[in-house]
Amino acid sequence: MDFAERAARNEEVFRGINERIEAGAELHGIETPERFHCECDRGGCFEMVEPRPGDYRELLERRYHFVVAPDHADPRVERVLEERDGYWVVEKVGEAREALDRQHPHERHQS
């Protein structure tokens, strides 16, 4: 498995956890910032970021967008779209984007 595929797999693991956090926040009507896992490609990263659940929900609607801790963006597999207070929004590019499509197709996400 090459770097891009490992990066995509690692990021999707934390995406799955964060989706459950967001679903719980939505269920209970929580709109204050919540703790989500950094979705970077670093295998040993356990950083937390604190977007509002509604902001994270919007991010989920974009297939290739992820939330990472500041300075955790990896230019080999993603580009920074926005630097927000306490976290960055990144977009997967190149081989990492292709690996996401192969490994984890999500019909609910938009391109």
Image (cartoon, rainbow, N blue to C red):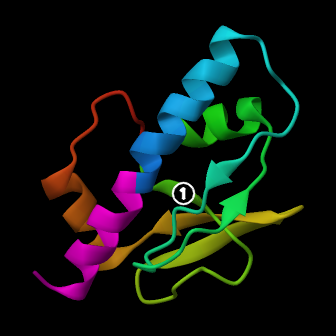
Quadrant placement of the C terminus: top left
Of residues 12 and 37, the one drawn nearer to the viewer in this rendering? 37
Q: Is residue 107 left or right of residue 37?
A: left
Q: Is residue 50 left or right of residue 103?
A: right
Give the vertical position of 21 relative to 17 (above or below).
Answer: above
Which residue is drawn at the image coordinates 68% and 60% (left, top)?
Answer: 48
User: Can residue 62 be seen at all in this image of the molecule?
Assistant: no
- Mark 1 Cα-neighbour bin, 10 Å: few <14, some 14–19, many ≥20: many
Asked if the stretch drawn in magenta spans residue 92, the answer is no
Q: Is residue 51 left or right of residue 95?
A: right
Magenta stretch: give its range: 1-13
- What residue is disc 1 on? 66
Asked if the stretch drawn in magenta spans residue 6, the answer is yes
Q: Position of residue 51 (x, y in %)?
A: 78, 46
Of residues 54 and 91, the one drawn nearer to the viewer in this rendering? 54
Q: Amino acid at mark 1?
A: Phe
Please tell me whether mark 1 sits on a helix, a strand or a loop.
Answer: strand
Q: Is residue 40 left or right of residue 22?
A: left
Q: Position of residue 53 (x, y in %)?
A: 73, 32
User: Can residue 23 be seen at all in this image of the molecule?
Assistant: yes
Which residue is drawn at the image coordinates 45% and 48% (left, top)?
Answer: 15
Which residue is drawn at the image coordinates 66% and 40% (left, top)?
Answer: 56
